[in-house]
Image (cartoon, rainbow, N blue to C red):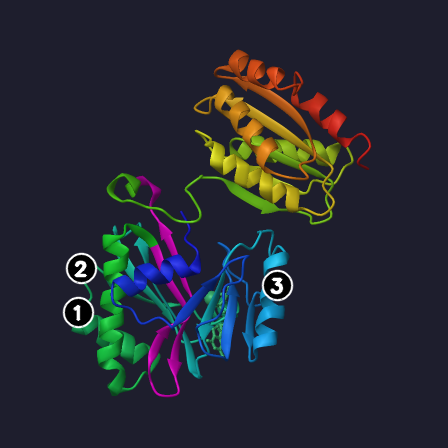
Amino acid sequence: MRLLEYEAKQLLAAHGAQIPAGQLFTQDLNEPILSLPFVMKVQIPIGGRGKAGGVRPVYTDSEFRETAKELLSNPLLGYRVNTLLAEEMLEIKQELYLAITVDRPSRSLVILAHTEGGIDIEEAVRQSAPHKIPLQNEPDESTTQQLLEYTGLTENMRGPVDHLLHALWATCVQEDALLVEINPLIVTATDQLYCADAKIELDDNAAFRHNWNFEQNPTGSQFVILNEQGTVGSMANGAGLAMATVDAIQQAGAQAANFLDVGGGTNARGMADAFERLSQLPRIKAIVINIFGGITRCDEVAEAILMAQSSVTNLPQLYIRLTGTNEAKGKEILERAGIATLPDLQSCVTAATQGTM
Ligand code: GDP
Ligand code: MN
């Protein structure tokens, strides 16, 4: 499960990492307490917000209102924006990349660091590989030493770096994270270290140990926008079936808008989120739903479809193939609600693409 930036920062702060002062804003746009100027950032579970216009400096109160309204009323990178994080503006001297993640071959954690952090990290990594420091145990003086040597950070940063490494490590181990990534880690003009952005991926298998209550519930679903202008959306369970569904739509001559694998053991909330995202695609006119119930039960899928229909506005016409575990029960639930199913994928695709090209 991928956390939103503000959720990740709350966890990091609880483990002692230094994060910028901040305030959250939602649709009702409460009054700012944070003093201007600040940076406003859309809270969506994906990187690249900076380049896509989702990180904005604001200097005045009217700028704050305009920017907030604009950011909250447009989807970004395919995600509806519900929350904005405003943060004190930092005076940046240097942007670093620092992460702790699981290194499967060595069955341990590893620190990844790069001196060229920030929005061009992919390019920086192509130029030179990130520096790796294996972590068999808690970070110690030698870990800090290695990081200082690699980054060229000066002696006065030893204490703060040591403190941060412990905070990252504690977050990773105690929260059962697979990845804790700070990009950028900012060194300010006054040599303070701030986690200016944070990405945390929690291990869903450890959910039973925690009381997780985050904005993004674990759904195990994978949603990828293929074509913003696509007219036919799709939803399937299992990556193979989802790819086959996209292919069938393209082969019928229509433009597939997205790839969506809702995963096994589909939960209603996750599917409702998926429908919500599909309904945001500007040109979508039909959705093909291709479910083969194995672990996923058709009756649960049917309930989720009903829930989505009642909660999502502007939902386009659905063309549904539903087969496998509890098929009869699932179809009955849909029929009672006046929703028809079709016998196979091809009939769904044919019906969905008619009138959408
Ligand atoms: P991402 O593009 O989704 O990774 O979003 P980030 O939170 O990493 O922000 C992108 C970029 O915005 C950062 O690399 C910084 O250069 C810049 N940025 C973020 N916060 C601040 C800030 O407080 N002050 C200034 N001046 N720039 C910031
Ligand atoms: Mn970032």
The structure residue drawn at horizontal position 35% and vertical position 88%, both measured from the top left corner, is: 190
As measured in the structure, the alpha-carbon distance from the residue carrying label 1 to the one carrying label 2 is 8 Å
Can you say which quadrant of the picture contains the C terminus? top right
Look at mark 3 in the image and give the residue it sits on: 69
Residue 226: image x %, image y %? 65, 46
Which SS class for mark 1? loop
Name the foreground residue: 125 vs 37. 37
**Image location of residue 323, percent across then percent down:** 56, 18
User: Is residue 117 at least partly visible in the picture?
Assistant: no
Q: Earlier in the sequence, mark 2 or mark 3?
A: 3
- In the displayed structure, would residue 206 be above or below residue 321? below
The residue that disc 1 covers is: 140
Mark 1 Cα shell of 10 Å, populated few (<14), some (14-19), many (≥20): few
Residue 38 place in picture, x, y as percent: 49, 76
Query: How far is disc 1 from disc 3 in space, using C-alphas?
Result: 46 Å
* Disc 3: CA contacts within 10 A as few (<14), some (14-19) or many (>=20): some
Residue type at mark 2: give it: Asn
Rendered image: mark on residue 137? 2
Q: Secondary structure at mark 3?
A: helix
What's the CA distance linking mark 2 and mark 3?
46 Å
The type of residue carrying mark 3 is Lys
Residue at screen point 69% across, 49% down? 228
At horizontal 72% and vertical 36% (from top left) the residue drawn is 250
The residues colored magenta run: 179-205
> For the point 74% across and 33% down, which residue is it?
251
Kindly check if marks 1 and 2 are in contact, taking CB atoms under 8 A apart as contact.
Answer: yes
Q: Amino acid at mark 1?
A: Asp
Task: Identify the mark nearer the N-term, 1 or 3.
Answer: 3
